[in-house]
Image (spheres, grey):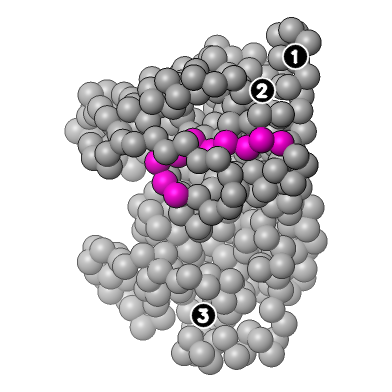
Amino acid sequence: MKIALIRKNYTPFGGAENYLALTAQKLAARGHDVHIFSSGLWPGSFTIHKIRTFKKPSFLSNMLFALKCREELKKESFDCVLSFDRTLFQDIYRAGDGCHREWLDKRAIIETPFRRAGFNINPNHLVQLYLEKKCFLNSRVIIANSMMVKKDILRHYPVAGKKIHIVYNGVDLERFRPSGMERRREIRKALNIRAEKVILFAGADFRRKGVPTLLRAFSLLNEPSAGLIIAGRKPKPEYVSMADSLGITGSVRFHGAEKRVEDLYAAADVFVLPTIYDPFSNATLEAMASGIPVVTTAYNGASELIEEGVQGFTVTDLLSAGDFAEKIAASLKNSEIMGKAARAKAENYSIENAAESFIHIINHIFFYKRSGIGG
């Protein structure tokens, strides 16, 4: 088969990029002709179609990329086109970023009325919503990375449920694995972590991922020996000030970016993500694979892998610091047992299995296109 894969940008640490790269490698190994359409440079010996755009303004860049991709794709004949971005010409769309309209609804919970009103005229949102609608209505198959995302799509768009397939994200089970007590002690010493019990947060978008709720929850914990590590980016002054006003500065470390995030998981006792909206948080599955329980919200698609009180806990009221404090405390008391259950669950979701699921759907589309059936 001659197969086109679309992803606008490339970063070696991106979840979608990892899926695309692994899927491309598996397809090429089976003798298929793999083409990648992107504005970035990709590793590997694939045929790269460089789509030239500009970085800003982002709404024009995204629209231009979608238009240019369609133009270039029409110049050749492909057996299947799989897009990992909101584009205009694809057989399969992987909705890895979830449903933008649902994200705006969730974001409205934490925004001022003035900011909410701006959603309707913000060109970035208007372009994303336009491309999203085109993707959902025109793609033969939609891949959602959680049941939550599938329900979001069906709630906002007139899409047939049967064309939405759920493929959960996968994880590198070798990179992310339980550490053992000796390695945990070594890593804590190397990172100068002195707390007996370590609560970990990892994520770049502090506001969307719920750092304010996490700080309030930590201040309510009756765990004098516990410490909180917040990793992912340099904090804005408002978060440092909030920790100070809550009287927890001495127990909170703003760690910043960490390339070896697996070391942070190895040092932690529990992972907490009070996210407002996450189609499927890769960090959640990474933490589970690392053998630590997870406390997150019901608005994280990855929460579908968590059985209440077994691998962690799910909080329905995403702004309830009290609920989070209660679930964090319960997780700390049973972290070893729950961590083992988390690892066992994660072992069902390797990144290789996810890539194989993509390939199965690609073969399905190829069959229907060749046979002239609607798919």
Q: Which mark is residue 79?
A: 2
> What's under tag 1, amino acid-wise?
Arg
Report if residue 15 is visible in the image: no
Whether the residues at callouts 1 and 2 have beta carbons within 8 Å, the answer is yes
34 inside magenta stretch: yes
> What's under tag 3, amino acid-wise?
Ala
Q: Earlier in the sequence, mark 3 or mark 1?
A: 3
Q: Residue at x 64, y 31 (%)?
A: 3
Q: Residue at x 71, y 14 (%)?
A: 369
Q: Quadrant of residue 364?
A: top right
The residue that label 1 is drawn on is: 370
Report if residue 258 is visible in the image: yes
How much space separates mark 1 and mark 2, taking CA atoms?
A: 8 Å
Q: Quadrant of the C terminus?
A: top right
Q: Is residue 371 above or below residue 334?
A: above
Q: Secondary structure at mark 1?
A: helix
**What type of secondary structure mainly makes up the magenta span?**
strand
Q: Residue at x 63, y 17 (%)?
A: 140
Categorize mark 2 by other alpha carbons within 10 Å: few (<14), some (14-19), many (20+). some
What segment is highlighted magenta in the picture? 32-41
Q: Residue at x 80, y 61 (%)?
A: 344
Q: Earlier in the sequence, mark 1 or mark 2?
A: 2
Task: Give the percent coordinates (x, y) of residue 135.
Answer: 50, 21
Task: Give the percent coordinates (x, y) of residue 269.
Answer: 61, 74
The residue that label 3 is drawn on is: 226
Residue 369 vs residue 119, the one in the foreground:
369
